[in-house]
């Protein structure tokens, strides 16, 4: 290290020891501080480390960031530029003291792997230039297959190159087409009423007068509304680089007063981690910004976690996917190796490299056509073939009727989940999508959604996210104008998505209570349930609003398909919808509907 470098490091960092913890004080400085932070972590002398930042605005560039190949579930795998890399620590504390961390370019800001205790608090994350393109829609000509945008320039980065838009042009990376796009309401910044997801790849772009761009796309069937703001985040293959916070194989994790204004993937992503709290935190657009998107994907995401998860007093807005997604992972049986060994495959390309199981984990076997969890067995050996295939050896013999195409689910790694006192709104997709067999409590939240507000959906194909729920309480929430865009949804939708080999009538999800909620809705659907055993809908107050014109006015408020033991009681409706309950022959056998007001019992 040069003499000048030593002087800078001494000025920025001071070390002191409190018990077994190494406390590193980082004083504010202008310019790129990424390498200084990297040195502080790499040179730590203790496995208990605390980084304490003097309050200020810090800049993090990628020039001297750690480059490491990462498999990141629900993102693109590859080499990632990591700023804060914590690996194998007993405890980590990051205290921002109200600081702003500003990033530039493709980076994975925080990665925690194999840490036994994590606390991050009092910090805000943002990018100086977002990885997005947006413009006001000023004209549309459906007959000639074009629409015109007045692009945003201040704070955004893009170029018109050979009749195509490229953005953001940072660190030699560009999206070469608009990709995943949605129109937004310019005033509220919410996804526009009636909007659908579109992947936009213009045939060519013309530059018109006054900075207007005309986009020709001959296969476009649904055009954005004139007066809306069209926002694009690039092509699906490249637009999920990394989450703001990646935590894997760690436990006892607390995020408190952590706000994310932008990220190149999810906000908070947890893989195979245990006991997690996200408190008083948020994912939303910075006050005063003209951006209409905060982060590129889910605000929070939990893959094969266990213990207790709590999200409390948080605000999630503007993200381009779900408020939270909690799930396990189905792997598909590729072949039976011997009486105790089976080769399994990860099926979705954004799951390749995911650690499905380790030695000692219990695994459920699900054998088509029944989606029911069958026998369990304990893993004694894991042999990774590559990022796609793994051989699992079990303690006991495998059932002789197991076959290729069946799926396995990890029993050990499932969490209980509580979501309380949060606000989730003005974003793409669902507020909450969740699949865990352990207890789920969703209470006292304010929710408004583009698609279904709450979705319970295990799926044995495409995403292969397990599994069916066993105990769900949804109570005392306030739902406001949910399911205002996209295909047909509901406030609560329970809808397994199973492959063709599995039964389309067997019961899947169980024991769901939907009670004491206030629902203000412009449309008809409240609960849409398929293959549920044990569904209680009681003491809810439903009020019709006139915010939007109904998208599906002929839908029933409560729609039941292949369900059993459903009770709809003591609910009150005020409005003009006349279609209350629809149930197929199977659901009618055990259906109880009584003491409701405002619709037929």
Image: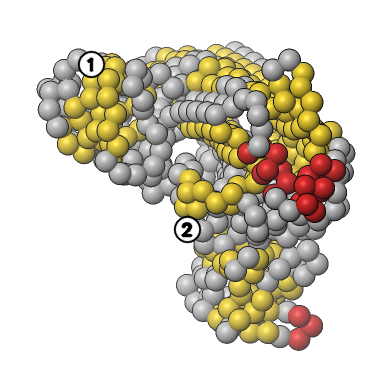
Dividing the picture into quarters, in which one does residue 17 lie?
top right
Relative side of 596 to 128, left or right? left
Image coordinates of residue 130 in percent, x first then y, are 70, 58
Foreground of the two, 158 or 494: 158
Relative side of 228 to 112, left or right? right
**Disc 2 designates what residue?**
237
Q: Residue at x 36, y 25 (%)?
A: 358
What is the crowding at mark 1: few (fewer than 14 residues within 10 Å), some, or many (at least 20)? some
Dividing the picture into quarters, in which one does residue 452 lie?
top right
- Can residue 552 be seen here? The reply is yes
Foreground of the two, 382 or 191: 382
Q: Residue at x 39, y 49 (%)?
A: 349
Image coordinates of residue 321 in percent, x first then y, are 58, 45
Relative side of 498 to 474, left or right? left
Image coordinates of residue 378 in percent, x first then y, are 29, 17
Question: Distance of mark 1 from mark 2, alpha carbons?
Answer: 39 Å
Foreground of the two, 233 or 522: 233
Q: Residue at x 68, y 71 (%)?
A: 158
| Vertical side of 338 occupied by 40: above or below | below
Q: How is the image coloured?
A: secondary structure
| Vertical side of 493 occupied by 222: above or below | below
- Can residue 276 be seen here? The reply is no
Question: Can you say which quadrant of the picture contains the C terminus?
Answer: top right
**Mark 1 / mark 2, whichever is N-terminal:** 2
What is the crowding at mark 2: few (fewer than 14 residues within 10 Å), some, or many (at least 20)? few
Q: Residue at x 60, y 22 (%)?
A: 90
Helix, strand or loop for disc 1: loop
Foreground of the two, 441 or 306: 306
**Disc 1 designates what residue?**
395
Image coordinates of residue 438 in percent, x first then y, are 48, 16
């Amino acid at each position: 290290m040069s003499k000048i470098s030593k002087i800078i490091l001494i000025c920025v960092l001071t070390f002191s020891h409190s018990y077994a913890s190494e406390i590193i004080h980082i004083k504010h400085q202008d310019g790129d501080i990424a390498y200084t932070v990297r040195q502080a972590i790499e040179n730590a002398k203790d496995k208990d480390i605390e980084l304490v930042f003097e309050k200020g605005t810090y800049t993090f560039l990628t020039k001297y960031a750690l480059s490491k190949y990462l498999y990141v579930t629900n993102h693109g795998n590859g080499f990632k530029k990591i700023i804060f890399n914590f690996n194998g620590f007993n405890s980590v504390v990051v205290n921002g003291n109200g600081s702003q961390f500003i990033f530039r370019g493709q980076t994975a800001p925080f990665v925690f792997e194999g840490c036994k205790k994590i606390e991050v608090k009092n910090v805000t994350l943002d990018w100086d230039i977002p990885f997005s393109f947006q413009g006001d829609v000023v004209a549309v000509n459906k007959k000639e297959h074009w629409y015109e945008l007045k692009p945003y320039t201040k704070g955004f980065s893009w170029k018109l190159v050979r009749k195509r838009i490229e953005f953001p042009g940072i660190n030699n990376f560009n999206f070469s087409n608009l990709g995943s796009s949605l129109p937004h309401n310019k005033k509220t910044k919410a996804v526009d009423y009636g909007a659908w997801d579109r992947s936009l790849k213009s045939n060519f772009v013309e530059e018109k007068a006054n900075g207007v761009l005309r986009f020709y796309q001959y296969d476009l069937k649904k055009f954005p509304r004139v007066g809306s703001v069209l926002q694009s985040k690039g092509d699906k293959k490249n637009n999920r680089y990394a989450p703001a916070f990646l935590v894997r194989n760690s436990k006892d994790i607390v995020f408190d007063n952590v706000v994310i204004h932008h990220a190149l993937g999810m906000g908070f992503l947890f893989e195979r981690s245990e006991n997690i709290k996200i408190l008083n935190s948020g994912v939303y657009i910075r006050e005063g910004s003209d951006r209409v998107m905060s982060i590129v994907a889910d605000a929070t995401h939990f893959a094969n976690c266990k213990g207790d998860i709590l999200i409390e007093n948080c605000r999630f807005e503007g993200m381009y996917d779900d408020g939270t997604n909690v799930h396990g992972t189905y792997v598909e049986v590729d072949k039976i190796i011997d009486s105790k060994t089976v080769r399994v495959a990860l099926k979705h390309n954004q799951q390749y490299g995911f650690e499905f199981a380790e030695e000692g984990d219990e695994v459920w076997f699900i054998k088509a056509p029944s989606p029911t969890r069958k026998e369990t067995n304990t893993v004694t050996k894991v042999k990774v073939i590559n990022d796609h295939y793994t051989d699992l050896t079990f303690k006991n013999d495998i059932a002789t009727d197991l076959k290729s195409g069946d799926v396995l689910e990890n029993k050990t790694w499932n969490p209980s989940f509580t979501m309380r006192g949060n606000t989730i709104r003005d974003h793409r997709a669902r507020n909450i999508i969740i699949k865990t067999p352990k207890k789920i409590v969703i209470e006292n939240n304010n929710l408004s959604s583009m698609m279904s507000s709450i979705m319970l959906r295990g799926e044995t194909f495409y995403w292969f996210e397990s599994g069916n729920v066993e105990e769900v309480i949804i109570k005392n929430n306030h739902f406001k104008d949910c399911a205002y865009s996209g295909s047909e949804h509901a406030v609560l939708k329970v809808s397994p998505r199973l492959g063709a080999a599995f039964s389309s009538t067997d019961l899947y999800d169980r024991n769901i209570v939907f009670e004491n909620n206030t629902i203000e809705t412009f449309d008809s659907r409240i609960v849409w349930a398929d293959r549920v055993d044990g569904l209680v809908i009681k003491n809810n107050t439903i009020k019709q609003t006139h915010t939007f014109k109904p998208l599906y006015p002929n839908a029933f408020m409560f729609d039941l398909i292949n369900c059993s033991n459903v009770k709809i009681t003591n609910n009150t409706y005020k409005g003009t919808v006349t279609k209350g309950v629809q149930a197929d022959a199977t659901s009618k056998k055990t259906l109880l509907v009584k003491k409701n007001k405002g619709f037929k019992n």
